[in-house]
Image: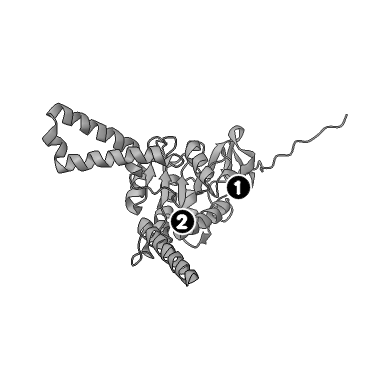
Amino acid sequence: MATTTKVDPVKSKAPKVTADLPGANQTSNNVDIKQLLEAGAHFGHKTSRWHPKMAPYIHSKRDGSHIIDLTKTVLALEKALQFLTETAAAGKQVVLVGTKRQAKDIIEKLAEATGMPYVNERWLGGMLTNQKTIGGRIKHLKDLEAKMESGQLAAKYSKLELQRYREEIDQMNFMYGGVKNMVAHPGAVFLVDIVQETNALREARKLGIKTVAMVDTNADPSLVDYPIPANDDAIKTIQLVADYVQQAILDGRSTLRDEPSGSDSMSKAKSAKKADKQTEDSNSKQ
């Protein structure tokens, strides 16, 4: 009786954690493979939880878990960083998303350093696809904050009612604080874990917004425009990738020092386009 052999697309030989990983001593541009190795970026999930489309990014197996090929991570990360730099240089926003426990503080600090919108609590449905509703809530929040700061609410309401308004402001800032200044159509979305951030990824894809994401061995990299194969559970790895992302965005924004930013550049572009159209109409009449 003939027997069939099951072919495993991933090698089963277990490499050592140090120099035996391919290219462990290589440094490519600004991405250092040694730093990725030290941060544990190569550790994947259990082999039973893997996604078949991650096979090209997996180097081997060890102790029942997959080991990510860091040479592939370096190449993918460099490509993603180049895109983020170009996006920031074009004056576009990059929405930073990371709601898992390991990523919350890192994402908030990254947003503060880059001036980009972020979500590190819960992704509310429609943050990208339902701007009418979300925008209305954010406008209400900004109005309350302005009235509170000007003393308008204090002059009109009692201390108890004023306290209720403060609580409402705090609650709304918890939900919308990171995206108060987000434009309707940002240039990109950066996600730490696409399994965790399924809704954010789905909305970005629906609107055609480019995505950059850390993708572990249990996720589908084909869903992301710029996947970065890496351990998305280790704080050190998330922090290292966030540092690279921060530098890429700041490099891009540095080219905008003497140029109008985001909404200003878009409004001027629209005005110029309108002026050109008026000129063409007047010429055609003549």
Amino acid on which the number 2 mark rests in the picture? Leu
Which disc number belongs to residue 37? none
Which quadrant of the view contains residue 45? top right
Q: Circle 1 — which element?
A: helix
Which quadrant of the view contains residue 6? top right
Residue at 41 percent across and 57 percent down: it is 249
Q: Which residue is mark 1?
A: 57
162 left or right, relative to 134: left
Residue at 21 percent across and 29 percent down: it is 164
Amino acid on which the number 1 mark rests in the picture? Tyr
Q: Quadrant of the N terminus?
A: top right
Q: Circle 2 — which element?
A: helix
* Residue 102 seen: no
Q: Residue furthest front?
A: 286
* Residue 161 seen: yes
In the rendered image, residue 265, in percent from the top left (x then y), is placed at: 38, 61
In the rendered image, residue 171, in percent from the top left (x then y), is placed at: 29, 33
Q: Residue furthest top?
A: 160
Q: Which residue is mark 2?
A: 84
In the rendered image, residue 169, in percent from the top left (x then y), is placed at: 25, 35
